Amino acid sequence: MSILVLGTVALDTVKTPFGRRKRILGGSAAHFSMVARLFTDVHLVGVVGKNFPKIHVDFLKKKKIVLDSLISSAGKTFEWEGEYKGDLNTAVTLRTELGVLATFKPVISNKQRKIKHVFLANVDPDIQNYFLSKVDSPQLVGLDSMNFWIEHKRSSLLRLLKKVDIYVANDQEARHLSGEHSLINAAKYLHSRGPKMILIKKGEHGAFLFSDKFIFSLPAYPIHRVIDPTGAGDTFAGGFMGYLARAKKITAEKLKKAVAYGVIAASFNVEAFGVERTHSLKIEDLDYRLKKFRDYVLF
Amino acid sequence: MSILVLGTVALDTVKTPFGRRKRILGGSAAHFSMVARLFTDVHLVGVVGKNFPKIHVDFLKKKKIVLDSLISSAGKTFEWEGEYKGDLNTAVTLRTELGVLATFKPVISNKQRKIKHVFLANVDPDIQNYFLSKVDSPQLVGLDSMNFWIEHKRSSLLRLLKKVDIYVANDQEARHLSGEHSLINAAKYLHSRGPKMILIKKGEHGAFLFSDKFIFSLPAYPIHRVIDPTGAGDTFAGGFMGYLARAKKITAEKLKKAVAYGVIAASFNVEAFGVERTHSLKIEDLDYRLKKFRDYVLF
């Protein structure tokens, strides 16, 4: 089944101990799509400005990402600049220029309204709420957000939680939104606010999925050199949601495997800047690591 | 096979968001033994002062821990006072009084010299070096240490690394001693300094084992409320080394299961202050969680 993903398409400027890249293709929807496309058709919903390089549009098309609802608006493309230091777990944001994102109103086709698997990648929760109301009868809705919205649009985000099936958050966000230190308690609290499942991403420490039926946890796949973690969470979600869209019927077993695909997807993402590694990924690459990953946690 | 453990027996004063305990039984060797005893005979090598409560000695004896080489010296028992805040991942040390530990010279019996499984729990690396030279021909030597010794006795610790099979470190210690941010690279570096295996404990994020043959990683067992993490690393080592001593032949499979026992042992430890939970543990309790833990990571 196809996936509809709402999120940002951005120009990122990133510095890590391993180098710097200026105005490369980034954004939550772009990173998500780069992995989800390996499992199914991905319909990207977003906005770019008139200055968005045609080369990036052509590149996304070449990757078979459906761009019918990627609007090009008057104004500048969303830009983010950040730096990672030390253990590369946390980015310091140096600059954010919303540009066309400030007035973004997503529009989708009648055909896209019928898509059953929806992912609300990180963007203003008011836009996520609005967008979700445009989808006819989604079967599985995933949600991502960030600290900025937890701080500034808490009530919008909490309202949104009631309408989604899976809330995907990193450890900091889960603690921030729940006010709980323990991640298990944070997941419990967030679960009580609506979503059937809470998926907590812990960066180099892996991820865990909390539902009322089971808890499932995985360490990160061992990476020898993390070059740039930007988009790791989005590619994680891309692997997770992508596999579920392909799997169709959602069982506990499928959900666990989906978490594993998410962890594996993120492991590729962090090995290079931007989409430099994920754009050339094949499903066989994911499956190869998935097999190795099993040995890695089996006792 | 029996285990010989060198380490501290202490009086701990601990404060966490869940309460406070004054001068309770603690120390690396005491915590280690409280779990390792479930698998095999544990011979504790350490020192206490004349003020050490007889009730603690009787308690350890009742737990079948062999105290032949627990010296009682003139002076005061080693005391540690610490506090955990926030996510309870790191203790702030408020007070350390070495007491009899300052002049401690371990003595073991001729019978104990022949024990094949040895664990050097956290204590001055010069004492660990000296002690290890007294053991006839150990087959498996595990080592733990702490940031204080990495800072102040780095060369003694590096010398010791060449003589041990398994170095057990937490994430901070591994980064500190290796100078590497990435835990995988930290493990690689530490491995290059001598030990066949590096076992890195990551608190609420589980643990991983690095060897030249394989890497193995596990998340932490999910605990709903961490009450006091003091001794978690020591009980982890107790489960790990204890199982290996019972397993006799050491294979990759046994090592993986030993890591799982370590994680499980620590999960019990953190659920109460001091040895309040571990002292009443049965092997069946560990096995019950071990079984649940498998489901928890299997995909």
Image: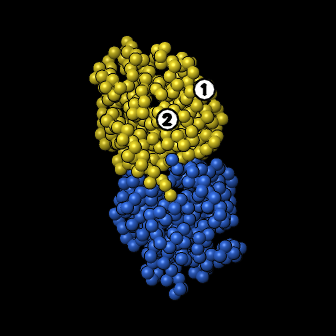
Chain colours: A blue, B yellow
Mark 1 Cα shell of 10 Å, populated few (<14), some (14-19), many (≥20): some
- Along the line of sight, which residue is nearer the eye, A244 or A277? A244
Residue B242's x, y, as percent? 46, 33
Residue A40's x, y, as percent? 58, 74
Asked if residue B116 lies left or right of residue A26, the reply is left
Q: Residue at x 49, y 39 (%)?
A: B258
Residue B147's x, y, as percent? 52, 32
Q: Chain of mark 1?
A: B
How many numbered discs? Answer: 2
Asked if residue A93 can be seen in this view, the reply is no
Circle 2 SS class: helix
Q: Is residue A261 above or below residue A17?
A: below
Q: Residue at x 46, y 81 (%)?
A: A135
Query: Does the CB distance between marks 2 and 1 fall below 8 Å?
Result: no
Residue type, numbered disc 1: Lys
Q: Quadrant of residue A54?
A: bottom right
- Image depth: mark 2 or mark 1 in front: 2
Asked if residue B282 can be seen in this view, the reply is yes
Return the residue at label 2.
B247
Q: Residue at x 57, y 77 (%)?
A: A43
Asked if residue B179 lies left or right of residue A185, the reply is right
- Along the line of sight, which residue is nearer the eye, B244 or B59? B244
Picture quarter with the N terminus of chain A: bottom right
Residue type, numbered disc 2: Ala
Asked if marks 2 and 1 fall on the same chain, the answer is yes
Q: Quadrant of residue A64?
A: bottom right
Return the residue at label 1.
B163
Identify the residue at the far top of this view. B74
Q: Is residue A262 above or below residue B284?
A: below
